Amino acid sequence: MHMLFRTILHAWISRFGKQVGHYDVVSTKLRVLPTDLDILRHMNNGVYFSLFDIGRFDLIRRSGIWKIFMDHGWYPVVASETITFRKSLQLWQAFTVESRIIGFDDKAAYMQHRAVVNGEIYAEAFIKARFLKRTGGTVPVADLLDAVGQVPPALELPEWLVRWGDDVKLPSTRAEAPSTWE
């Protein structure tokens, strides 16, 4: 429940934040709260993804992408995510979530998030997101790009990230996916 209140607070704050371009890096200031800690008294690994959600929402809200989604009846969902840690964030420590869109494949958008303290990366995550229609079905990336604008030529999705996305995907929701262990 605590993350819901924090998300609502930052959604409200992002309304008044500086407007940015779709492909800019957006910085969202946060602080480690007691509810973010695990039994070792540093930020729980799962909390990073929740806080990166806040950074992602800040980016799409301040860039105007959220309004485009709402106008079209679209919404993003995370399909895959991976994270790497360097250092632990401690109680009350201030940090910044840096977020950016790094590219698209034929079905999804990819984003990068970093937890940064004084210019130093503590953790970094990559997110693969799909887009759904409130009326049902998926939004083709071509339709998404028609609505938000084409990708700048300098923005190139790293090949390893496309391979990762392919390597970790699960079967379609329409296909069988039995839980069997080999």
Image (cartoon, rainbow, N blue to C red):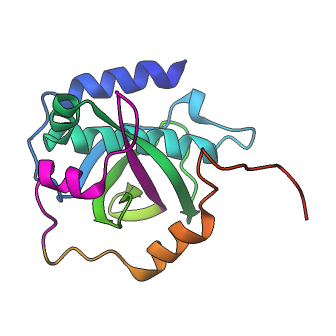
Q: How many marks?
A: 0
Quadrant in the picture for the C terminus: bottom right
- Name the side, left or right, on which 126 lies relative to 149: right
User: In the image, is residue 71 part of the stretch drawn in magenta?
Assistant: no
Left/right placement of residue 78 relative to residue 120 reads right
In the rendered view, tell whether residue 18 sits above or below residue 175. above
Looking at this view, is 139 or 99 the one in front? 139
Q: Tell me residue 44's x, y (percent).
A: 63, 43
Whether residue 43 is visible:
no
Q: Which residue is nearer to you in this view: 21 or 139?
A: 139
Rendered residue at 63%/36% (across/down): 37
**Residue drawn at the location 16% of the way across and 39% of the way down:** 62
Horizontal and vertical percent for residue 88? 58, 54
For the point 37% across and 37% down, the residue is: 54
> Whole-percent x and y of residue 63?
14, 44
Q: Quadrant of residue 85?
A: bottom right
Residue 115 pos. (x, y %):
42, 54
In the displayed structure, does residue 87 sit left or right of residue 17?
A: right
Asked if residue 127 lies in the magenta stretch, the reply is yes
Q: Which residues are magenta?
A: 123-152
